[in-house]
Image: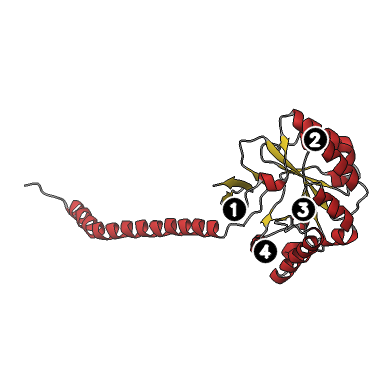
Amino acid sequence: MKRFGRKQMLLRKTAGYLRGPSILLLCALLFFAGMRLTSRQSRAVSAMADQRELPVYCVQTDSPQIALSFDASWGNEETQHLLDILAAHHVKATFFLTGGWVDTYPEDVKKIAAAGHDLGNHSENHKNMSQLSESQQKEEILQVHEKVKNLTGIEMNLFRPPYGDYDSTVIRTVKSCGYLPVQWDVDSLDWKDYGADSVIRTVTEHEHLGNGSIILMHNGAKDTAQALDTIITRLQEMGYELVPISQLVCMDHYTVNFEGRQIPE
């Protein structure tokens, strides 16, 4: 029979005492690690649930279609020129109107509608929508809606927030008013007054330009009309068909991904 020395026996005895607590310690560590993982998963699910709601910046489509849009909140010197250029190219666009612009230029609102272009809502007073209460947001949307309806008979359903400013509350309010919130993925930067050549390059060489793109321009910018003819010509030479936003987007049965790209279901 093998004999153990006092030291060896003490070590074996100590190991026996530690075996049980060690297992308990290991179980405890695994338990807390599991809780930590579960906590991370919960936070991830919570973050997804609280994810910011987005407007439509562009549309996922295999068709080489893109949309020109004009924000009309100031000035009117070039509106007829823009309409003439669009007509010459047989192109329909989308004009987002503020209530103030509608009040000041009602005959031009009628001309835009008569030419077959989309009329879109750009708010009553061109305020930062995210800084308003929900009731004020609805007022900004519905006031200009009624003005355009009374003037043209058209029930608008596309909304672009002034300055591109929005939060999830704004998006929910817009939708509750029967509107699709629409932004852009190609900014012409015509409002910076860098010149017509700059506007042309910015649009036609834009990194985001592609099928389903929405281009932002302004009817009141001084270089837009001068640049428009060349922009349309180059885009058509690139194989794009220019359509109004209403023809590009889906009003229902869609999702919007993290890029703001509308994906039809």
Q: Nearer the viewer, mark 2 or mark 3?
A: 3
Identified by mark 2, the residue type is Ile
> Residue 119's mark?
3
Q: Residue furthest right?
A: 77
In the image, residue 179 lies at what x, y percent? 68, 58
Taking 27 as reference, is 80 left or right? right
Decide: few, some or many residues near mark 3? Use Cα within 10 Å; few <14, some 14-19, many ≥20: many
The residue labelled by disc 1 is 252
Amino acid type of the residue tagged 1 in the rendering? Asp
Q: Which residue is mark 2?
A: 232
- Which of these two is toward me, 134 or 155? 155
The mark that comes first in sequence, 2 or 1, is 2
The answer for how far apart the CA atoms under marks 2 and 1 are is: 29 Å
Image disc number at residue 211: none
- Answer with left or right where residue 248 lies relative to residue 74: left
x and y percent of residue 20 in the render?
A: 24, 59
Q: Indicate the position of residue 232 as horizontal and vertical percent values.
A: 80, 35
Q: Say whether marks 4 and 3 touch (CB < 8 Å).
A: no
Colour scheme employed for the rendering of this structure: secondary structure
Q: Counting other residues with Cα less than 10 Å from the Cα at mark 4, is it few (<14), some (14-19), or many (20 or more)?
A: some
Could you tell me the amino acid type at mark 3? Leu
* SS category of the residue bearing label 3: strand
Seen from the viewer's position, the closer of residues 128 and 174 is: 174
Q: Secondary structure at mark 2?
A: helix
Could you say which quadrant of the image residue 209 lies in? top right
The residue to which callout 4 is attached is 177
Assign a secondary structure to mark 4. loop
Label 2 and label 3: CA atoms lie apart by: 20 Å
